[in-house]
Image (cartoon, grey):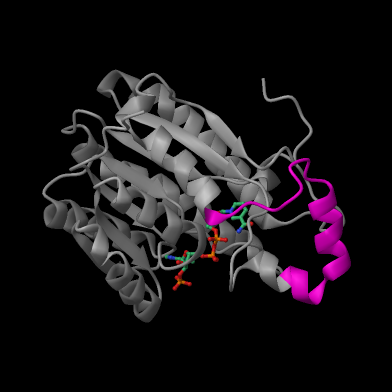
Amino acid sequence: MELGLKGRKAIVTGASRGIGRAIAAQLADEGVDLVLCARGEEALDKTAAELAHFGVNVHTARLDVSETDAIVPFVERAADLLGGLDILVSNASVGTQKGPEQWQTSFQADLLAFVRLAEAAVPYLERSDAPAIVSIGTTSAFDTLPPTGPNSYGAAKAAVTHHAAALARTLAPQGIRVNTISPGPVEFPGGTWERIKEQRTEFYEGVRSRIPLGRLGTPEDVARAVAFVASPAAAYCTGVNLVVDGGFVSRVQF
Ligand code: NAP
C-alpha cells in the first residue's frame, strides 16, 4: 500500500527517545520532513543525526510542552522551517507522576499541551491538501491497571482522547483528520517497562501474561500505526481511537 507520505511535513513532540523517536524514524523512512522537540537537547540532536540517512530534512527544537506559552512560537517556527505543515503528532507526555502535584503536572504537560498544539497547528494544517493530527493516548485512559490505583496519567490521557475525538468532528469541514493511537505497554531500552521488568519482575510478568500476543509492544509497532493514520491512505479515518496493545485490553472496541 502506498501511504502517500513522501514530501510531507510533520511535527513530532517528545521525539528524542522511545515511541516518539520511532514515529520520527518511520515518518522519515516514508520521506517526511520533520521538526522534532523534547526538553533535553543532547538526545534530540543525537536522534536527528541518526535520522540523517533517510535523506529528509530534520530540524530540532528544545521545548517543554508544559510551558504552553511557548507552543505557538514553536509551531510557527516549525512551519516556517518546513515550509508548511501536513501532520502534527502530539506524543510528548510526562508519564506517570507521583504526589499531590501530579494532577497539575499531567494537566499541563499532557492535556493542555495537546489542546494548545492543535490550536496552533490548525492555521497551517488548513493549507495542506492532506492534513492530519495524531494524538498518542494509552490503554490506561480506559483501563485501570491494578494495583496502581488512581493516577493523573490515565485521567489526563482520557481527557486527551476525548478532546481528539471532539476535534475530529470540529475540524472535519476543514478536511483535517484527527485520530488517537492508544498503545498498551511498550518496551524499549531505557523506557518505563524495561525499568519495571528489572525492578518489579513479578508485576511485569503479570502484565505480559495478560497480553494475548504474548509480548509487550515495541515503539515500531506503534509508529507504523501512527504513519498509517497520519497518511493520505487513511483519508476516510477520523475520530478513530486505534488501540495497539497485542490484545491487552479485553473490552470490545465498538
Ligand atoms: P518516554 O520514554 O518517557 O519519552 C518521552 C519523550 O517525550 C522523550 O523524548 C522526552 O524527552 C519527551 N518529553 C517528556 N516530557 C516532555 C515535555 N514536558 N516537553 C517536551 N518533551 C517531553 O515516553 P514513551 O514511553 O516513548 O511514550 C511516548 C508516548 O506514548 C507518551 O504519550 C506515552 O504516554 C505513550 N504511551 C507509552 C506507553 C509505554 O508503555 N511506553 C504506553 C502507552 C502510551 P525529554 O525528557 O528530554 O523531554
Which of the 4 image quarters holds residue 247? top right
**Which residue lies at the image location 75% right of the left edge and 69% below the top edge?**
196
Q: Considering depth in this image, is 100 or 187 the residue closer to the camera?
A: 187
The C terminus - image quarter: top right
Q: Considering depth in this image, is 59 or 27 the residue closer to the camera?
A: 27
Give residue 37's position: percent from left, percent from top.
34, 64
Image height of 46 relative to 11, above or below: below
Q: Is residue 217 magenta?
A: yes
Please report the bounds of the magenta region as a residue range.
Answer: 196-219
Q: Is residue 21 magenta?
A: no
Give residue 218's position: percent from left, percent from top.
58, 54
Give residue 7's position: percent from left, percent from top.
18, 43
Left or right of 104 in this view: 32: left
Which of the 4 image quarters holds residue 60? bottom left
**Which residue lies at the image location 70% right of the left edge and 73% below the top edge?**
195
View extreme (bottom): residue: 42
**Which residue lies at the image location 86% right of the left edge and 53% below the top edge?**
146
Left or right of 136 in this view: 3: left
